[in-house]
Image: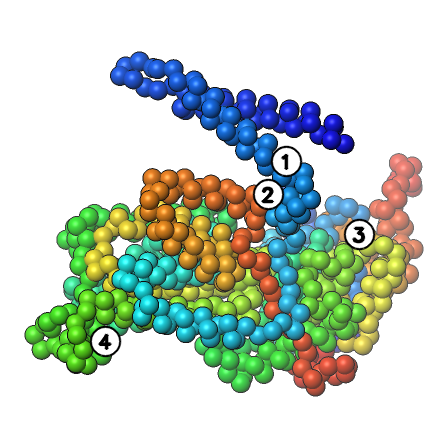
Amino acid sequence: METNRFPALLKQALLTFTVSLILFGPISGLVLDGFSFRNELMRAVLLAAVVTAGRVAISLVQMTGFGQKLSSRMTDRGAGVTVLTGQEKSPVLLLVLLFVAGLSLPFFTDKYFLGIAILALIYCLLGLGLNIVVGLAGLLDLGFVAFYAVGAYLLALGAQYLGLGFWSALVIAPFVAGLCGMILAFPVLKMHGDYLAIVTLGFGEIIRLVLNNWLEFTGGPNGAPVPAPTFLGLEFTRTAKQGGVPIHDYFGIAYSADYKFWFIYLVLFLVVCLVIYAVERLRVMPLGRMWEALREDEIACRSLGVNHVFTKLTAFMLGASTGGLAGVFFAVHQGFVNPTSFTFFESALILAIVVLGGLGSTVGVIAAALVLTILPELLRDFAEYRVLIFGIMMVVMMIWKPRGLVRIRRPAFFPSAAADGGEALPAAGKAEAAR
Amino acid sequence: MSQPLLDVRNVTMRFGGIVANRDVSFSVERGAVTALIGPNGAGKTTMFNCITGFYRASEGQILLDGADGPQDLGALMIRPITGGSHLVTRAGIARTFQNTRLFKEMSVVENLLVAQHRVTANNLLSGVFQTSAFRRAEREAVDRAYYWLREMNLADDANRLAGELPYGRQRRLEIARAMCTGPRLICLDEPAAGLNPSETRELSEVIKRLCIVHGQTVLVIEHDMGLVMRISNHVVVLDHGEVISDGTPEHVANDPAVIAAYLGVSEEEMKA
């Protein structure tokens, strides 16, 4: 047995070494020196040797019992979806703990970390919104950032032209963003898959370019200022504007610039909780079920009388509304918006959050949003490699966990006590049968 | 007998220059099983798609007798903006597919709940806040789903994924799902395709039961002649897009035109 393995291992090592040498040769073996090249082939050989050693080490670990167990666990794809048995323990206690922990976070952290937390929650919101469109309804949307921009600019421009405040923008933004979603969705809903993705990509770019080029209205690349939020008319500044009252004066406490972020964090946290609740409810509601059915099979849906156009439209609108909400928080947190915040990279990042989290899984999306926003901050020292690490992570994820971090679990349904066991036909069913 | 439930009148279906159905007329009687048979390529599935609203017939009318008189299904398809095949289902025609089209990554009950979207409370707010009307509608829908699962002998699989079920059960689940829409007419597209003999027997029991116990009108396309002869009250035979025979199973089985279409005839016989 052992003798059989050795040649295979040697062959594998040789192959790895050759491939990595071919790769590293031009990349790090040739160094540009003025107008000529310098040969640094030793460096390439060294790198290839490191890679080969790594490969051999992995193979050796995989040969042991522990390694085999690990790799079989990692590649356990299963169906990716399971149905609950209805006997699981309710996670209420855990949720309450998380809720309290989330609410009390500002009292334990510094301003820097609170800023990251706000950003993470904004991405949670975006991920949840896109999850409705991509994860539940199965419509690939590459221009989601457009709705984010709509929300952010609604607050910035609304304040400038109409005197809108944070709170009114928070209420209006979902509707305006939803309207934009509808305008986009109407002409494109007959499309499927890749075509839809391209059109939404175009829409995202259109919004950004309009914001960038309509100088008189949006301020173009210079952006637009966003007013600070107020709480019941109380301001978060050291000295209030004419007629206003700063919050620290009202409560008679010392001034701190952090109050504004505490406030934004708390409101944002509550909104995220509400959205999570709504999305979780949607999954067991007729509308959410129709979205998922539409993702599974559109023709079957039509054969059941589901109006596929309106159902997709609702998914687009609700997703866009959530994106708009996130935009308002982004604007108020930054205090300033400009079009560079709404590039395609943002759309791709949000899509990555949804895909990494597991299409359709709320917990997965939240986890992925937190990881993908907090991790880069912790890796500030490796700033240059951030995108590289990000890419490697995506590749690794897609190989070992193509269905996302979190397995999707479907709710279980049981008949009510009255109908259980009996052959009694429910009232409506009887009427149908009698026809 | 009163007016037939479904009346197909002179339907012609063309795809470009190809005529798939030429001047097809037949009717489906209330509370009976009507079978549509014919050799491969005879235009059965095209006819079926016209009836269930997936194609719009080029010429002719398909009338469904509803609460307020006969309704032309073709007109539902071309209604501006809101028109489409889903309206045909809402008018009372449910269908299954030749290759099952279940929502594979949803549970069996959820498959049936999606079908009942007409009677559940679809309002967004009522669902988020779980109003009593919403909960009542949901409970009734779940009970109705279980009722049909029991009818199809699937109750034990209720909380499994639809895609995990064996093929025979998927077939029956598809029938249960179609029944959950509360149809006047259920159309089964080759329900026995890919089933083994015992599953086919079970299926014929199910179809008979639908017809006798529930008074359900059934239209079925099928290649399995044993099944067709066992269950149907009325058989329509299509060949080359035209009706060549129409009558009771015995009549059709002995019709020389049908035998010729299935077995082929020699040149001499044609002339004779």
Of callouts 3 and 2, the N-terminal one = 2
Q: Position of residue B63 (x, y in %)?
A: 65, 66
Q: Farthest left residue?
A: A242
- The residue at which mark 4 appears reads as A231
Which is closer to the viewer, label 1 or label 2? Answer: 1
Q: Position of residue A433 (x, y in %)?
A: 72, 78
Q: Is residue B4 above or below residue B199?
A: below
Q: Which mark is residue A171?
A: none
Q: Which mark is residue B194?
A: 3
Give the amino acid type for the residue marked by disc 3 in the picture.
Answer: Gly
Q: Which mark is residue A60?
A: 1
Give the amino acid type for the residue marked by disc 1 in the picture.
Answer: Leu
Q: Position of residue A238 (x, y in %)?
A: 13, 70
Q: Are marks 1 and 2 in contact (CB under 8 Å)?
A: no
- The residue at which mark 2 appears reads as B16
Q: Residues within 10 Å of mark 2 (few under 14, many from 20)?
A: few
Q: Is residue B66 left or right of residue B31?
A: left
